[in-house]
Image (spheres, rainbow, N blue to C red):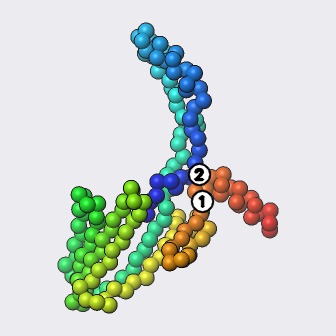
Amino acid sequence: MNEDSVWYGGPVNRNNPDAKKHLPTIRHLLQEGKVKEAQRLAELALSGIPDQQRHYAPLGDLYLRFDHKDVRNYKRVLQLDYAIASVLYQSEGVTYTREFFSSFPAKMMVVNLTADHPGSISFTAKLTRNKGKGLDQIGIINKHVIMRGNGGGKVLEKQMLANFKNV
């Protein structure tokens, strides 16, 4: 699973404070045809600081385990028009369907599990993140699965130092 706000070390303001004051000079150099000079100044004044963005980190992994035997007619379907990925198969006379849907505007991810015989769906689920790194808590609160942690970097470093001082 991914979520676009999970970054190593947390949010950073990378806006270059020199950008606004050098923009008129860069424009003037371009108007005079001094492209190389304008480019050199733009690389210094308009680039984000630090010059590299922190890397994106996955939110976590959701593992669903189904103990189905003798699986037949296994089929995967990707419906790009509806943003739905599906898995369909049969096991012991039951047809199972798993549908996965994510919506950025609705800020949600949905897993829809169905079977053509009532009472046939049974599974175990495991939620984890990066082999436990940066993961502080996974639990259920008010019927919602909650995962808490951090993206590492200075946030994680401060937490580790605080834990070390308490030992």
Q: Is residue 111 visible?
A: yes
Question: What residue do we see at 37% from left, 86% from top?
Answer: 122
Secondary structure of the residue carrying tag 1 is: loop
Q: Residue furthest top?
A: 32
Q: Which mark is residue 150?
A: 1
The part of the image, by quadrant, that contains residue 83 is bottom left
Examine the rendered structure and indicate whether residue 55 appears above or below residue 160. Answer: above
Q: Residue furthest left?
A: 73
Q: Which mark is residue 94?
A: none
Indicate the amino acid at tag 1.
Answer: Asn
CB of mark 2 within 8 Å of CB of mark 1?
A: yes
Q: x, y (%) of residue 25?
A: 52, 15
Q: x, y (%) of residue 24?
A: 51, 17
Q: x, y (%) of residue 79?
A: 23, 62
Question: What residue do we see at 32% from left, 78% from top?
Answer: 113
Residue at the spot of label 2: 10
Q: x, y (%) of residue 151?
A: 58, 57
